């Protein structure tokens, strides 16, 4: 899991961010086989190219073509990681913008600058529309194609966790009934992923640990339940520690890094419960379980 960026996007002084599996670096350098590639292989190559050029909207287009060409086949680990990276970067930029604009809005409100507040709200609404469209796009793809075609346990957990993540992103800015529905959908997806992870993945598996990390962030940030967040994170950490000696070399780095994020959040959350601090929370990064990313 090359360079898990645990800042859950960027650092915003006014908005502590949870450590959760979110943004990976380049998955790999694009290379093409000497033989004539299939359309699916061409789109995989172009997705890698777009990633290196940091043209993430186009990367999304290429990975969606990969998914379409796969039809009922399960995506490869490389392909699903490209999908995760593409959407995470596209959504991440908007989440960062929304946090910044919301912080400015609060400051202008406190100063009584009503004219500025009105303009800011219009601008924030535009960002929220973009966020909704991005989340709706990946959630539709997950429900219609990716989750139904997943057969391996790690694939099922990967996609259900992803489904929970994007409903959680909706819950971050929605209000009223829409926020309640987004939170319920998040909880449902994370619980479904957790059931499969507990039954089919080892406590030290990076995907299972990443799920626990993001699920605990959901309890803390969206449901305002620090006790449940801490209990979930601590249980995942303790179970992984108990089996650390069985961890294979190929996933040791990824797993131990996520375990560190779990421990960091536990430290932050217990401290916050004591003094209401406003430090930075950490999320997991959308990196594949492979060592390089």
Image (spheres, rainbow, N blue to C red):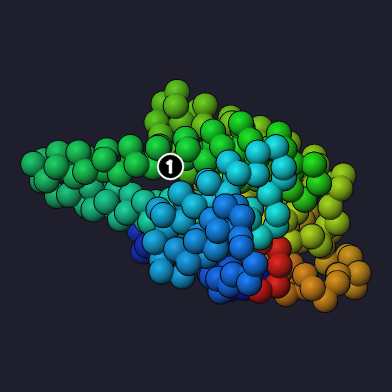
Up the image or down, 114 lies above or below 22; here it is above
Left or right: where 111 falls relative to 240:
left
User: Residue reaching furthest left?
Assistant: 115
Q: Residue 73: x and y, percent?
A: 72, 42
Pick whichever, 225 or 85, lies toward us: 85
Residue placed at 58% from the left, 49% from the top?
A: 66
User: Residue reaching furthest top?
Assistant: 177
Q: Secondary structure at mark 1?
A: helix
Q: Residue 138: x and y, percent?
A: 52, 41
Q: Is there any visible trace of residue 83 in the rendered image?
A: no
Quadrant of the snapshot with the C terminus: bottom right
Up the image or down, 173 lies above or below 36; here it is above
Q: Residue 46: x and y, percent?
A: 49, 61
Left or right: where 216 falls relative to 244:
left
Residue placed at 71% from the left, 67% from the top?
A: 290
Q: How many marks?
A: 1
Question: Mark 1 sits on what residue?
Answer: 134
Residue placed at 81% from the left, 46% from the top?
A: 152
User: Residue reaching furthest front?
Assistant: 36
Label 1: few (<14), some (14–19) or many (≥20) C-alpha neighbours in 10 Å: some
Pick whichever, 210 or 36, lies toward us: 36
Pick whichever, 77 or 62, lies toward us: 62
Quadrant of the snapshot with the N terminus: bottom right
Q: Residue 8: x and y, percent?
A: 50, 60
Left or right: where 140 falls relative to 194:
left
Q: Quadrant of residue 240?
A: bottom right
Residue placed at 63% from the left, 72% from the top?
A: 34
Q: Is there any visible trace of residue 169 in the rendered image?
A: yes
């Amino acid at each position: 899991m090359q360079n898990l960026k645990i800042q859950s996007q960027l650092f915003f002084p006014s908005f502590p961010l949870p450590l959760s599996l979110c943004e990976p670096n380049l998955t790999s350098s694009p290379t093409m086989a000497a033989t004539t590639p299939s359309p699916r292989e061409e789109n995989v190559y172009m997705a890698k190219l777009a990633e290196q050029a940091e043209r993430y909207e186009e990367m999304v287009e290429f990975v969606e073509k990969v998914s379409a060409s796969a039809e009922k086949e399960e995506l490869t680990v490389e392909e699903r990681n490209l999908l995760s990276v593409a959407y995470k970067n596209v959504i991440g930029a908007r989440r960062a913008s929304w946090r910044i604009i919301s912080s400015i809005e609060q400051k202008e409100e406190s100063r009584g600058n009503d004219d500025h507040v009105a303009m800011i709200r219009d601008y924030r609404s535009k960002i929220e529309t973009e966020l909704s469209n991005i989340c709706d796009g990946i959630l539709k793809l997950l429900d219609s194609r990716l989750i139904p075609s997943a057969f391996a346990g790690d694939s099922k957990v990967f996609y259900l966790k992803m489904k929970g993540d994007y409903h959680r992103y909706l819950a971050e800015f929605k209000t009223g009934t829409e926020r309640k529905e987004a939170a319920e959908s998040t909880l449902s997806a994370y619980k479904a992923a957790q059931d499969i992870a507990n039954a089919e993945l080892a406590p030290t598996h990076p995907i299972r640990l990443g799920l626990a990390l993001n699920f605990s962030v959901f309890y803390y940030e969206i449901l305002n339940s620090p006790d449940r967040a801490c209990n979930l994170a601590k249980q995942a950490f303790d179970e992984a520690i108990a089996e650390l000696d069985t961890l294979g070399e190929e996933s040791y780095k990824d797993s131990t890094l996520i375990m560190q994020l779990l421990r960091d959040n536990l430290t932050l959350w217990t401290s916050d419960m004591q003094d209401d601090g406003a430090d930075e929370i950490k999320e997991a990064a959308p990196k594949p379980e492979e060592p390089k990313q």
